[in-house]
Image (cartoon, grey):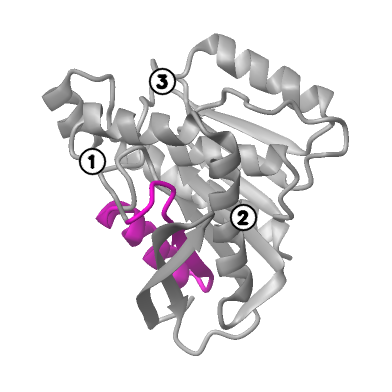
Amino acid sequence: MASDIDTKKITYSADGTELQGFLAAPAGASNCPGVLVFHEWWGLNDYIRGRAAQLAALGYVAFAADMYGGGKTADDPAGASELMNGVLADIPSAEARLRAAYEQIQSAAGVDEKRIGAIGYCFGGAMVLHAARTGVPLAGVVSFHGSLGSAHQPQPGEVRAKILVLHGAADQLVPDADVDAFKKEMDAAKADYEFVAYEGALHGFTNPAATEKGKKFGLPLGYDADVDARAWQDMKAFFERVFA
């Protein structure tokens, strides 16, 4: 485990849109696996930067990507929905931003280009799954309480990344029908995937601010410290296998 980490903001672009990312790496990183981090619908905020720093403390070079452009964030569901739907309404642009993020981690100092993965939260979970569905050359991806709907139906062999989905069994924002459809889709694509459902966990179970935001905005969100810790351990074990 790395004891010291270096962090910095990274300005990059995709299709002419300026993006504001965040890089966290072990001090003196060399030949380390790289992990992309994709944000919730709230945008690339302190929570996501903190997750990147946690990954760096584990010995990974982590790059938190900006999917909204200009480092935009939202403090309320209306603003978050507008930003998120703007991305989802233009999948080619979203894919350009995914590729730009991949190129950033691929070229980051100290990264082993053959060992790159990605994690995503909520909206970011949808993004890492889309990256896997479309054959982005990632070793593995982890979705934390992510949306499971598909904008691309992969053909057998198209999913190159191993997939770990960490889902709240009590998540009211991801219908059971979406869970069933996702599993059928992955089976049909012959993808290497694992689906873990944590009993009683609500949407946003990894974010300490989820319960308060849920109450404030009338949304079925909830933080669960025990499930958060379990999910992080499940991610760690997954990447240990994937990057071995």
Circle 3 Cα neighbour tier, 10 Å, few/some/many (<14 / 14–19 / ≥20): many
Where does residue 72 sit, x and y in percent of width and height?
29, 49
Residue that badge 1 annotates: 74
Mark drawn on residue 171: 3
Residue type at the position of mark 1: Ala
Q: Which residue is nearer to you in this view: 91 or 226?
A: 91
Q: Nearer the viewer, mark 3 or mark 2?
A: 2
Q: Is residue 24 magenta?
A: no
Q: Horizontal placement of 197 versus 40: left or right? A: right
Q: Which mark is residue 99?
A: 2
Say which label, 3 or 2, has the lower sequence index: 2
- Mark earlier in primary sequence (2, 1): 1
Residue 196 in sight: yes
In this picture, is 167 found above or below 58? above
Distance between the alpha carbons at the discs numbered 3 and 2: 30 Å
The image shows residue 78, relative to residue 164, as above or below, that is above
- The crowd level at tag 2 (other Cα within 10 Å; few <14, some 14-19, many 20+) is some
Q: Residues within 10 Å of mark 1 (few under 14, many from 20)?
A: some
Q: What are the residue bounds of the magenta stretch?
A: 45-70
Residue that appears at 87% across and 38% down: 157
Along the viewing direction, whichever of 233 and 138 lies nearer the viewer: 138
